[in-house]
């Protein structure tokens, strides 16, 4: 894989205005015996998953680790992030690491992302944006609702997507980082999720429901005994409109250290970039202008 292919794959995932489509939905079967009795103690899977966002809001905050794996044309790359999130105020901060080039050299400085209701702010964005400026993206204007655009799925948006769960099965008991969890597998409908989401996520999820080729999203969710998400893996596939290449994306979220103090301060208007973004940047914004809703 040469450097141009690597950069193209990273740009594909973060492109603004791409049209996404989903592959075949995953299905699961409820276990028998001890597993069936255990899910009875945890409650109906669909109901439990509908309440996962509420459980996070009750928890207040947490640390988060994100991973977004992409495959297109034989090229596979992974974008990783790490940070904190305040579920009550829907504010988060992530440091997102773009992939290294084939020689093992980092191709871009870490991107700082601030997540807020209806908006994504990025610093060290590259693509001609000054290092001391932020790029602001209105998530409701993105065809994916910012589920993949920033290279990381907003933790609370991911949880609220589960409000659209139509079918789910209890897989069994397991552990995530030493914490006992219940593993559920199912599919969520983005249109339904948008109807039942909080006001801050409603428009973004509605945009994703319209922008995806199908609004059905398969997932694996791992919830602790308080109903809080400890791990959530969601799978997408879409067609890059410019290259007509099929791109598979798996977004994985790990949440831990609940109650961690979170202090997120959004940029002042004077610190937000208002110029045109170059088309070949590491987190390609294509032809968007921050001053025009991006």
Image (cartoon, grey):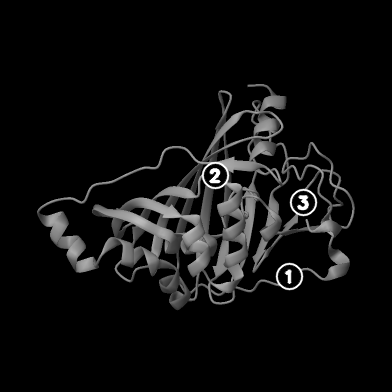
Of badges 2 and 3, nearer the viewer stands: 2
Q: Can residue 133 be seen in this view?
A: no
Kindly state the secondary structure of the residue where label 1 is placed: loop
For marks 3 and 1 on the same chain, the one whose residue lies earlier in the sequence: 3
Q: Which residue is drawn at 65% across and 34% down?
A: 240
Place of residue 107 in the rendered image (x, y in percent of width and height, measured from the top left): 72, 36
Q: Which residue is painted at 79% across and 59% down in the image?
A: 293
Q: Which residue occupies the foreground of this view, 139 or 103?
A: 139
Disc 1: which residue: 266
**x then y, percent, for residue 62:** 49, 68
| Location of mark 3 (residue) | 124
Q: Where is residue 241 in the image (x, y as percent from the top left)?
A: 68, 35
Measure how far apart labels 2 and 3 are at the Cα level: 19 Å
- Pick the residue in front: 202 or 277: 202
Image position of 4 (left or right of 231): right
Q: Where is residue 13 in the image (x, y as percent from the top left)?
A: 63, 40
Q: In this view, does 235 lie above or below 189?
A: above
Circle 2 residue: 68
């Amino acid at each position: 894989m040469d450097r141009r292919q690597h950069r193209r794959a990273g740009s594909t995932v973060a492109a603004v205005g791409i049209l996404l489509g989903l592959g075949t939905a995953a299905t699961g079967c409820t276990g028998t015996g001890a597993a069936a009795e255990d899910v009875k103690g945890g409650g109906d899977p669909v109901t439990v998953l509908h309440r996962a966002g509420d459980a996070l809001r009750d928890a207040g905050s947490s640390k988060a680790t994100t991973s977004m794996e992409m495959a297109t044309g034989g090229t596979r790359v992974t974008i990783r992030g790490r940070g904190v999130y305040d579920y009550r105020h829907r504010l988060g901060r992530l440091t997102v690491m773009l992939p290294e080039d084939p020689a093992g050299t980092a191709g871009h400085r870490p991107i700082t992302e601030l997540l807020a209701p209806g908006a994504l702010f990025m610093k060290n964005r590259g693509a001609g944006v000054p290092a001391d400026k932020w790029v602001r993206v209105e998530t409701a204007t993105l065809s994916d609702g910012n589920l993949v655009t920033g290279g990381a799925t907003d933790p609370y948006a991911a949880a609220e997507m589960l409000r659209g769960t139509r079918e789910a099965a209890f897989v069994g008991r397991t552990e995530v980082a030493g914490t006992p969890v219940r593993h559920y597998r199912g599919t969520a409908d983005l249109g339904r999720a948008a109807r039942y989401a909080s006001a801050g996520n409603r428009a973004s999820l509605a945009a994703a429901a319209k922008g995806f080729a199908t609004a059905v999203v398969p997932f694996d969710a791992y919830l602790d005994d308080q109903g809080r998400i400890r791990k959530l893996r969601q799978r997408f596939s879409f067609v890059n409109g410019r290259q007509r290449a099929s791109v598979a994306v798996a977004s994985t979220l790990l949440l831990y250290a609940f109650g961690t103090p979170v202090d997120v301060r959004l940029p002042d208007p004077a610190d937000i970039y208002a110029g045109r973004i170059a088309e070949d940047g590491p987190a390609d914004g294509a032809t968007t202008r921050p001053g025009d809703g991006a």
